[in-house]
Amino acid sequence: MLKGAAMGVAEVIPGVSGGTLAFITGIYERLLNAISHINIGLVKTLKREGFKAVLQKIDAMFLIKLLMGMAIGFVIGLKVIIKLLDSNPIMIWSLFFGLILASIPFVAKQVSKWGGVEIVFLVLGAALVYWVTIAAPSQGSSNLIIVFLAGIIGVSALMLPGLSGSFVLLLLGMYTIIMPALHDFLGNPFGPETGIVVAFALGMLVGLLTFAKVLTYTFKRFPNPTLALLTGFLIGSLNKVWPWQKVLELDPTKDGFKAVRFSESVLPGTFGQLADNPVYGNVPHILTAIIAMAVGILVVYGLDRMSVNK
């Protein structure tokens, strides 16, 4: 449940991937295998072997605990982490920078043999995600079909370490439509935003069941190139979680906070010379950032030491 909560918190924050947290905590492949077994074949299993066999096939208790944790983490992220990003952005981004930086060697060392193909996939993965982090966001829409498609794309990104589902929603222009709708839905489940939430949830379900099968297949058939690609994704994502950002465009949210719609990474020295930089300010807080990064790195190493499956 705690691992699920970490994934839930991560998915609220544009630039931090729930898939990364799943990889760090050692549950990534188990999660993919469990989801990939949810298909029409379960009906046959139910008839032949009974309900207990169905639960075992989809690793039901694992999924239930994980989803409960994700729901709790998502609510915490909406209520707490978003406000912390508004008040202490450098510290929070530094923490996540440390988490992702430390997780890169843990993913890379799972590649049993590094060759030319793996290096190409590493470079391609890093280049693709880096391009995603610097791409300008588009305009979103509250049309339910668009919201449904956004759910498919968002959850597919969620499942990839290094590629943030919420950041992809931001690029699509859907983040400031989906997140306020979810926030309002939590306060009033039968309010005007219910249709948006239902359409988004259905899209996520469709994306989850289809994309998990693709990833499970690539892990089994091409493990080394897949892991090299995911390592590249993590490297490329570091640009998005770099603590010192020059804000280029803001997006006001319904809560009265200012959400950063578009920004670019700068060096701490350049950051300190910025005349007007909303949300982030222009005080680099270098010592605080280093401490937060160190905490993130220690968390990853601590999780690795505590892991049952090496």
Image: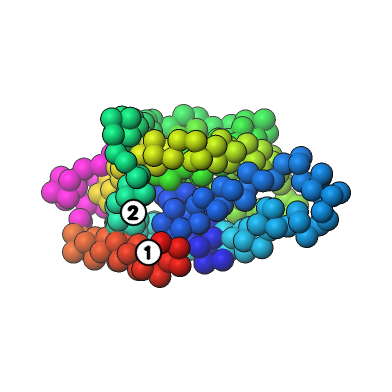
Up the image or down, 265 lies above or below 296; here it is above
In the rendered image, which quarter contains the C terminus?
A: bottom left
Which portion, as a residue range, is magenta?
Answer: 263-284
Query: What residue sits 47% from the left and 49% below the top?
Result: 19
**Residue 68 at least partly seen:** no
| Residue 259 percent across, percent down from the top left | 43, 47
Secondary structure, mark 2, is: helix
In the rendered image, which quarter contains the N terminus?
A: bottom right
Identify which amino acid the numbered label 2 is placed on: Phe
Report the side of 34 relative to 238 (left or right). right
Mark 1 nearby-residue class (10 Å; few <14, some 14–19, many ≥20): some
Mark 2 nearby-residue class (10 Å; few <14, some 14–19, many ≥20): some
The reply to whether discs 1 and 2 touch (Cβ–Cβ < 8 Å) is: yes
| Residue 273 percent across, percent down from the top left | 15, 47
Secondary structure, mark 1, is: helix
Depth check, front residue: 132 or 275: 132
The chief SS type of the magenta part is loop
**Membership of 26 in magenta stretch:** no
Report the side of 19 relative to 101 (left or right). right
Quarter assignment of residue 162 = top left
Report the side of 33 relative to 124 (left or right). right
Q: Which residue is situated farthest in the right direction here?
A: 47
Q: CA gap, disc 1 to disc 2?
A: 9 Å
Q: Which residue is mark 1?
A: 304
Quarter assignment of residue 263 = top left
Mark drawn on residue 106:
2
